[in-house]
Image: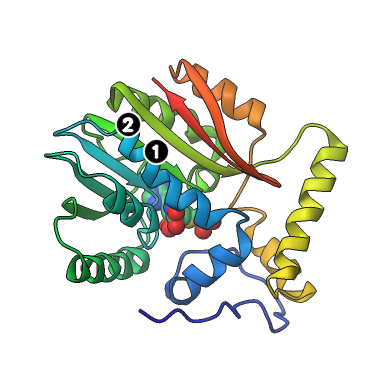
Amino acid sequence: MTHAPDRIFNTPLAQVPDFTFNEDVVRVFPDMIKRSVPGYPTIVENTGVLAAQFAQANSILYDLGCSLGAVTQAMRRHVSHSGCKVIAVDNSAAMVARCREHLNAQDAMFQELLPVQVIEADILTLTLQPASLVTLNFTLQFIAPEQRLELLKNIHSALLPAGALILSEKLRFNDADAHELLNELHLAFKRANGYSELEIAQKRRAIEKVMLPDSLEEHRERLHCAGFSKVIVWFQCFNFASMIALP
Ligand code: GEK
């Protein structure tokens, strides 16, 4: 499957609209996320490795906010427990349509992968079935802050004992120096990946009202409040991190 380069913000826009996961974004999404999120390929692949550790036979694994199904594909590469099924969910119709194409391509090339169901739905209203693993790979940051706790409570209620939530997010930092340095390093990462100052500035404007990162402390507190007993950071690169939350 060919991946178009992300040039969405490379010409000056009179007014930068709020970012949405529309057809234009879907077309360039693999290139965009790889060049924008430090550690993305490592997080995705190792979420598959983590999934294999936490998966239980005859259970469901959720990929919530699946976009094009990168995490779903990684889980299908690594998990081979009998009777498991992946449910991938996204509320962008354009993402869901392209996700199904990607997963069909994966099915065409490999044998004996876990069955998968792709659902177009809002994860805030979806009834979750009992699951051994739930992933929120850079999804929670797009949920309105006042709705995040409720979502995590629902996930916690759905998790089987000995299951896990894998939560990956962009972070902000309470320490002003740490915040500035790690943000600068993220910008350096984007420049090193070929984004211009114009692209960086316009993307920031598009995203600033729709993607609101929390600090690690806020994540820990909210996860504990939702019922999780332990929160372990297993990956961090600059201001991006991934956590394992245990029920
Ligand atoms: C990856 N996990 O490649 N319900 C369902 N989906 C939602 C909702 C919602 N309420 N809100 C946002 N989304 C992916 C990357 S991208 C992160 C995840 C990014 C979806 C939204 O449509 C988008 O596809 C995804 O969450 C966030 O590993 O682009 O930085």
Q: Of helix, strand and loop, which one carries label 1? A: helix
Q: Residue 192: image x %, image y %?
A: 73, 69
Disc 1 to disc 2: CB gap under 8 Å: yes
Q: Residue at x 67, y 34 (%)?
A: 215
Q: Position of residue 81 (x, y in %)?
A: 19, 39
Quarter of the figure with residue 27: bottom left
Q: Quadrant of the N terminus?
A: bottom left
Q: Could you tell me which secondary element the residue under label 2 belongs to?
A: helix
- For ligand 1, the image quadrant comes to bottom left
Direction right: furthest residue = 177
Residue sitting nearer the eye, 174 or 208: 174
Mark 2 residue CB less than 8 A from any atom of ligand 1: no
Residue 216 position within the rendered picture, expressed as x and y whole percent measured from the top left = 64, 31
The structure residue drawn at horizontal position 59% and vertical position 53%, both measured from the top left corner, is 39
Q: Is residue 14 above or below residue 143?
A: below
Q: Which mark is residue 54?
A: 2
Inspect the image, locate mark 1, and give the three-letter code of the amino acid beneath it.
Leu
Q: On the rendered structure, is 8 left or right of 177?
A: left
Q: Residue at x 35, y 53 (%)?
A: 74
Q: Which of the image's four quarters has the C terminus?
A: top left
Residue 50 numbered mark, or none: 1
- x 34%, y 46%: residue: 63
Question: Image height check: is 32 above or below 47?
Answer: below
Q: CA distance from mark 1 to mark 2?
A: 6 Å
- In the image, is 5 to the left or to the right of 116? right
Q: How is the image coloured?
A: rainbow
